Image: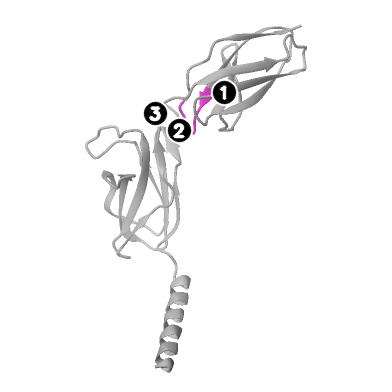
């Protein structure tokens, strides 16, 4: 009995090691973290990329977090070995815009007879964030100085500074409270406004103007 148990354990261990060395059918995947179909920006569609170990017949489904089917993105299509790029426009199978929320991507491979849930969810977000000025300094300022602008945003988003109506600085941070800097070049009066840019590409409305004088 002991000998049988030892043999069984050895076989199980060998099988486990063999499976570890066996290449996975999906070698690599990418799901865009967030997108906004209404933003008129590069994030207007969700990018989905797959790298297959070998060619296979593939079905790709978009599901909500409850598991309900929203869209069949690819239905039994033969995809080649290597990288394939797909896009989801944020609509369901009836062509109706899906609700804001988080969605998952399921990939079924007929040859491998397996369904894979891609590890990253994608957020569909059509609501633009807002920005609010907290403080700025110095005022007045001198040419060559940095203006420090502290702001608060309504959700994790980048801060954007507009100077005389033109976009000048983006913070590239998603902190709710942060600071951005803009370097003054010449004397004059500058009309500054803040906005917020979220990860999905939604640019919020411009906050009220504040004026910085450069003496």
| Colouring convention used in this rendered image of the protein | one colour
Residue beneath disc 2: 200
The residue lying toward the viewer, choosing from 189 and 100, is 100
- The secondary structure type at the circle numbered 1 is strand
Residue beneath disc 3: 126
Q: Nearer the viewer, mark 2 or mark 1?
A: 1
> CA separation, marks 3 and 1?
20 Å
Magenta segment, which residues? Answer: 196-202
Residue 25: image quadrant is bottom left
Label 2 crowd (10 A; few <14 / some 14-19 / many >=20):
many
Label 3 crowd (10 A; few <14 / some 14-19 / many >=20):
many
Looking at the image, is 24 positioned above or below residue 84? below
Q: Which quarter of the rendered picture does the N terminus lie within?
A: bottom left
Q: How many numbered badges does the structure rendering display?
A: 3
Report the residue at 49% width, 33% height from top: 199
Q: Along the horizontal axis of the image, is 123 left or right of 152? A: left
**Predominant SS along the magenta part:** loop
- First of labels 3, 2 by sequence position: 3
> CA separation, marks 3 and 2?
8 Å
Q: Which quarter of the rendered picture does the C terminus lie within?
A: top right
Q: Position of residue 91 (x, y in %)?
A: 29, 36
Marks 2/1 in contact by CB < 8 Å: the verdict is no
Residue beneath disc 1: 152
């Amino acid at each position: 009995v002991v000998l049988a148990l030892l043999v069984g354990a050895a076989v199980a261990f060998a099988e486990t090691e063999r499976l570890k060395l066996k290449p996975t059918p999906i070698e690599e995947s990418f799901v865009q973290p967030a997108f906004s179909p209404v933003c008129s920006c590069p994030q207007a569609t969700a990018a989905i990329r797959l790298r297959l170990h070998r060619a296979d017949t593939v079905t790709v489904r978009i599901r909500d977090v409850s598991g309900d089917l929203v869209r069949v993105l690819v239905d039994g299509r033969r995809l080649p070995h290597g990288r394939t790029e797909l896009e989801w426009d944020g609509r369901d199978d009836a062509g109706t815009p899906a609700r804001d929320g988080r969605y998952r991507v399921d990939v079924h491979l007929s040859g491998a007879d397996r369904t894979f849930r891609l590890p990253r969810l994608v957020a569909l977000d059509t609501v633009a964030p807002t920005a609010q000025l907290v403080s700025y300094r110095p005022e007045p300022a001198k040419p060559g100085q940095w203006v420090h602008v502290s702001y608060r945003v309504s959700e994790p988003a980048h801060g954007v500074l507009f100077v005389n109506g033109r976009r000048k600085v983006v913070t590239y941070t998603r902190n709710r409270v942060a600071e951005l800097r803009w370097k003054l070049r010449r004397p004059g009066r500058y009309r500054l406004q803040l906005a917020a840019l979220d990860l999905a590409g939604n640019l919020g409305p411009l906050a009220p103007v504040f004026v910085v004088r450069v003496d």
